[in-house]
Image (spheres, rainbow, N blue to C red):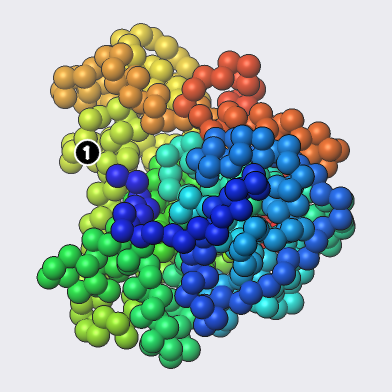
């Protein structure tokens, strides 16, 4: 079942404009009214052009097949024209940033166009909103390419995420550490509601609005929370806890480091949200901090599961006025303590080619992770090579051992891995390997690959963005013409610094 299961009873009200390449807009979150969203007019960008597009997603949204050659769409998705019949809005939220209450934030550079096919369509970088504070409301080409590619890379990996439809660009200057150029990413999700939306109304003591928000989320996305016998808001907290646990378990098993797990970047639907200073690990280093602005290492890779739990407590605190009994909220949150390890164990079992998780895999996994960390082994390459080797575990294939310095320790681990598979009746079976090759990707959006796409795009060559997008959309396939993108990171990758500045 898809993670964000829409309520079948929900009927959007279309505002039809059949001649436009994107017809059938509906208002979603904006129907909650002015306590929740502010209407706005995006600031046009001069002479926009297409940078990248996602044909498959366009098709899912029911866009005209020619949308990528439509000037109407280029204008619409740059914020230079209004959606036919629709209203543009920014939503208000608050949140905890780096563990500290940050007060009111809100969509400072995201503008919602409404919904198409039950999916909210947001422009990121289309100019200031009433919540921009001191920001310019813009996004630069560099970070927009990273967001576009990573959204679709996560989707390709089967990890719940917001999606990206396209990037448009303009030569208009945007100032960060240096002069860059503007871009707008069109992102797509059933909802962009964050933990921070709940924190906003709770902290500012607006219980009526808090209830409206919770009811909206439940009715549209978590209808099962209204099952007889359930307290709906406790059920909501329990459901969000479960989705978040599973999402973070998936991050940990592909080496994804989010970088800014503030509560305003946590999706109420358990989607990976807000791609800023994220990174896929090259070498396996659990202490890795991908965000150059995170001087304390709050969001280091190994801390992500605990941070998610901390963030869920913020959500629980925000829902307390609706839940009533603190014990009930705590009981809901405590499910994380068993759900996260169970989700992680299931994902690790799959990576190792076992049909299901079992206690007898624990030592194997612990030894492996220790070894990978000690030797800073390339995470993606190790798993992929292991997956190939699993086809015939008697073969003296050295490719797995080659990624270790301590080949003896690696050899011993491989022998233990083979023994456990033999005990479960799967030793050296092609079926195990096939399963592992569908679980352990060949390609990840490593920092240096994003950087190659960005450097070319700055010279107006968008072909690498498009090719990377195609490869990452199916990272389990071999893509023999792009073998180089499956290799080790070059030395210069270590000098790429990614901060919150985007
Ligand atoms: P982030 O760290 O990207 O999650 O952003 C935190 C908050 O700052 C959110 O409310 C964003 O909307 C806002 N923000 C980030 N960058 C800008 C910008 N360039 N202009 C306006 N608001 C921004
Ligand atoms: Mg954010």
Relative side of 206 to 448, left or right: left
Q: In this view, does 49 lie to the left or right of 104?
A: right
* Quarter of the image where the N terminus is located: top left
- Relative to 496, residue 229 above or below: below
Quarter of the view holding residue 267:
bottom left
Query: Is any part of residue 137 visible from this angle?
Result: no
Residue at the (36%, 36%) spot, across then down? 368
Picture residue at 60% right of the left edge, 48% below the top = 18
Q: Which residue lies furthest to the top in this view?
A: 395
Residue at horizontal 16 percent and vertical 19 percent from the top: 425
Instruction: Using the image as rendered, state which of residue 270 and residue 331 is in the foreground.
Output: 270
Left or right of 429? Residue 451 is: right
Residue located beneath label 1 in the image: 357
- In depth, the one of 11 and 247 nearer the eye is 11
Q: Where is residue 273 in the image (x, y as percent from the top left)?
A: 52, 56
Instruction: Examine the rendered structure and indicate whether residue 263 appears above or below residue 399.
Output: below
In the image, residue 154 lies at what x, y percent? Answer: 50, 42
Secondary element at image label 1: loop
Marks counted in the figure total 1
Residue 14 percent location from the top left of the image: 50, 58
Q: In which quarter of the image is the C terminus?
A: bottom right
Between residue 219 and residue 478, name the one nearer to us. 219
């Amino acid at each position: 079942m898809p993670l964000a299961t829409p309520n079948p009873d929900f009927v959007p009200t279309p505002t039809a404009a059949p001649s436009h390449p994107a017809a059938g807009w509906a208002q979603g979150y904006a129907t909650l009214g002015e306590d929740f969203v502010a209407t706005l007019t995006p600031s046009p960008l001069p002479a926009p052009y297409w940078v990248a597009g996602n044909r498959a997603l366009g098709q899912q949204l029911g866009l005209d097949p020619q949308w990528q050659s439509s000037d109407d769409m280029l204008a619409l998705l740059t914020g230079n024209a209004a959606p036919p019949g629709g209203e543009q809005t920014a939503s208000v939220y608050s949140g905890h940033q780096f563990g500290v209450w940050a007060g009111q934030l809100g969509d400072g550079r995201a503008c919602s166009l409404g919904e198409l096919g039950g999916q909210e369509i947001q422009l990121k970088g289309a100019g200031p909103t009433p919540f921009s504070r001191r920001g310019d409301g813009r996004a630069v080409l560099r970070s927009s390419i990273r967001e576009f590619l990573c959204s679709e890379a996560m989707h390709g990996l089967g990890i719940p995420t917001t999606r990206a439809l396209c990037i448009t660009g303009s030569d208009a200057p945007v100032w960060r550490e240096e002069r860059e150029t503007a871009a707008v990413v069109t992102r797509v999700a059933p909802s962009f509601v964050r933990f921070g939306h709940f924190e906003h109304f709770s902290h500012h003591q607006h219980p009526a609005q808090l209830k409206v928000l919770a009811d909206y989320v439940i009715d549209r996305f978590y209808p099962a929370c209204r099952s007889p016998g359930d307290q709906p808001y406790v059920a909501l907290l329990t459901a969000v806890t479960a989705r978040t646990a599973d999402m973070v378990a998936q991050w940990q098993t592909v080496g994804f480091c989010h970088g800014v797990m503030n509560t305003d970047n946590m999706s109420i639907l358990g989607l990976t949200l807000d791609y800023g200073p994220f990174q896929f690990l090259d070498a396996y280093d659990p202490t890795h901090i991908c965000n150059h602005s995170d001087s304390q290492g709050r969001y280091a890779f190994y801390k992500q599961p605990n941070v998610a739990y901390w963030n869920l407590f913020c959500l629980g605190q925000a829902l307390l006025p609706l839940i009533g009994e603190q014990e009930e909220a705590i009981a809901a949150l405590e499910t994380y303590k068993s759900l996260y390890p169970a989700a992680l164990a299931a994902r690790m079992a799959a990576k190792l080619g076992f049909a299901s998780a079992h206690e007898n895999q624990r030592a194997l996994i612990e030894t492996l992770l220790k070894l990978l960390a000690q030797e800073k082994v390339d995470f993606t390459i190790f798993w992929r090579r292991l997956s190939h080797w699993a086809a015939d575990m008697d073969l003296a294939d050295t490719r797995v051992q080659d990624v270790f310095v301590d080949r003896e320790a690696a050899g011993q681990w491989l022998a233990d891995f083979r023994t456990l598979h033999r005990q479960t009746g799967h030793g050296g079976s092609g079926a195990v390997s096939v399963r592992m090759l569908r679980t352990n990707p060949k390609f990840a959006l490593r920092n240096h690959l994003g950087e190659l796409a960005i450097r070319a795009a700055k010279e107006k060559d968008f072909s690498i963005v498009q090719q990377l997008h195609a490869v990452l959309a199916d990272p389990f396939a071999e893509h023999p013409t792009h073998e180089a993108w499956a290799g080790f990171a070059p030395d210069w990758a270590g000098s790429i610094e990614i901060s919150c500045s985007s």
